[in-house]
Amino acid sequence: MRFHPRLAKVLPPRAKPGDVALASGSTRSSIGPQMKVTLERAALLKALGHVHRVVERRTTIPILSNVLVRAEGQSILLKATDLDLEMTERLAADVAQKGAVTLPAHILYDIVRKLPDGSQVTLEADGEQGQLLLRSGRSRFQLQSLPESDFPDLAAGDIGHSFLLPAADLERLIDKTQFAISNEETRYYLNGIFLHTIEAGGQIVLRAVATDGHRLARVEMPAPEGSIGMPGVIIRRKAVAEVQKLVEDLSGEVKLEISPTKARFTFGDATAGQVVLTTKLIDGTFPDYVRVIPTGNDKKLVVDRDSFAQAVDRVSTISTERGRAVKLAVADGKLTLSVTNPDSGSAVEELDADYESTPLDIGFNARYLLDIMGQLDGDAALFKFADPGSPTLVQDKEGAAALYVLMPMRV
C-alpha cells in the first residue's frame, strides 16, 4: 500500500515490532509490565476477605470501589478505604516486578474466591493500558484498573497513646458491649463504643461503654501500660464490627494507638500477615453514663441464667409487636414471667428464684433481656431492682467486670 505524498510527510515512521508509540509520534521500546507478582490463592483470598469488607458497594467516587495492590520486596500490600475507615494487610508473595495498581475490590474477591483450592495466582499490570491480567491455571481475567496516585490515604497523624492488649481481652470488651450501640443516626454520638480510662475501686481501668438510651453495657479491665491518660474516644460502629471479625481470625496481642481524632489497631508483627485498621473517631461527646448507673438498688434477684433466658424466649412468642414487654413478678422464692397480647392471647411461666425483698412487678423488652443473658458468663444472673419505674442492674455477680443497665417498660 502506498500513501499519497502529502500524507507521507506527516505520518510517523513505521514502528518496529515491540515498540510503543508515543503521543508525539516518536517510538521507544516496550517497558514491559508495571507490576508482576505471584502468590498462593488461599493467602490472597484470606487477605481480600478482610479488606474488601471496608469497600462500600455503592459509592459515587470510583476509586473507593477499588482495592490498592502494591508489590514490593517479597510481599504485597492490600489497602481499602471508605474515607472513614482504612484497612491494610501485608502478605508474602513472589515479586518479579514491583509496582502498584488499584482494582475493583468486590470483583477481585469474587474471582479469587471461585478459583480452585491450592492454585497459584499471578497478577500482571500494564501501566500503559490501565489494565491488569490475572492468571491462575487455565483461567485468564483482564481487569480495568485505576492508578495508585488516585487512591486516598487515611493518615493517622500524631499518635499520643500506644499500648498492647491481648486479643482475647479486646474481643471481650467489644463482644460484651457492641449489642447496645445505638442505630439512631440523629444521636450520632451513641453510634459507637466509648473507650476510655478511669479510676474505679482504687485502680485505673480501661473501660468500654455503649448505650442506645434504653440499655447500657459497661465492661472494664485493668488499664494496660501506656493507656493511662488517653483521651476518651468513640469508636464508630463499622470499625467495631471489623475489629470484632479480625480478633476472631487472629490471636496474640493487638497494638492500639489512640489520638484525639483517629484510632489504629495493628494485628500481627511487621512481617507478612500484618493487618492494620485505621478509623476516624466519632466527633462528639459521649453522655455522662456514670449518672445513669444506679447505686441504691437494694432488691436482689438471683435466677438461673439459661432457665430464665429460655422462659423469656418462650413467653415472648405470644407477642408479635416489636417492643412488647415481658412482665416479671418477683416474690419470695419465685419468679413469674408473663406476656399478654390482646390479638393473640397470653403466656405465663414460673421459675424458682432467690429473692427475699418485698414483692415487685416490673416489665422489660424481651429482646433486651435475651441480649444481656447472652453476654453473661456465669450460670446465674443477678438482678438489682429499686422500683418498677427505675433502671435495673444486671450482672453475673457482685463486682463483676461486666455490668448492664436496663430501663423498664410500663406493663
Image (cartoon, grey):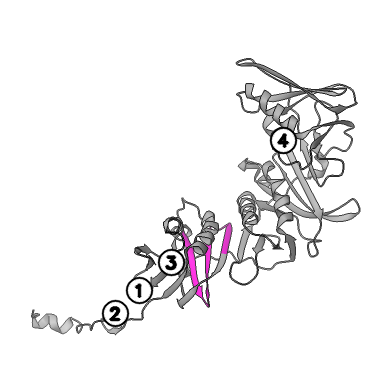
Q: Which residue is mark 4?
A: 214
Quadrant of res 354: top right
The answer to whether residue 98 of the structure is visible from this angle is no
Q: Position of residue 273 (x, y in %)?
A: 59, 67
Quadrant of res 296: top right
Q: Quadrant of the N terminus?
A: bottom left
Q: Are marks 1 and 4 in contact (CB under 8 Å)?
A: no
Q: Are marks 2 and 1 in contact (CB under 8 Å)?
A: yes
Question: Spatial distance from mark 4 to mark 3, Cα to Cα?
Answer: 50 Å
Q: Taken as a whole, is the magenta stretch helix, strand or loop?
A: strand
Nearer-the-camera pick, 259 or 19: 19
Mark 1 / mark 4, whichever is N-terminal: 1
Front tag of 4 and 3: 3
Q: Which residue is mark 3?
A: 121
Amino acid tagged 2: Val
- Label 2's element? strand
Mark 3 / mark 1, whichever is N-terminal: 3
Q: Which residue is mark 1?
A: 128
Segment colored magenta: 66-88
Amino acid tagged 1: Glu
Q: Which residue is mark 2?
A: 20
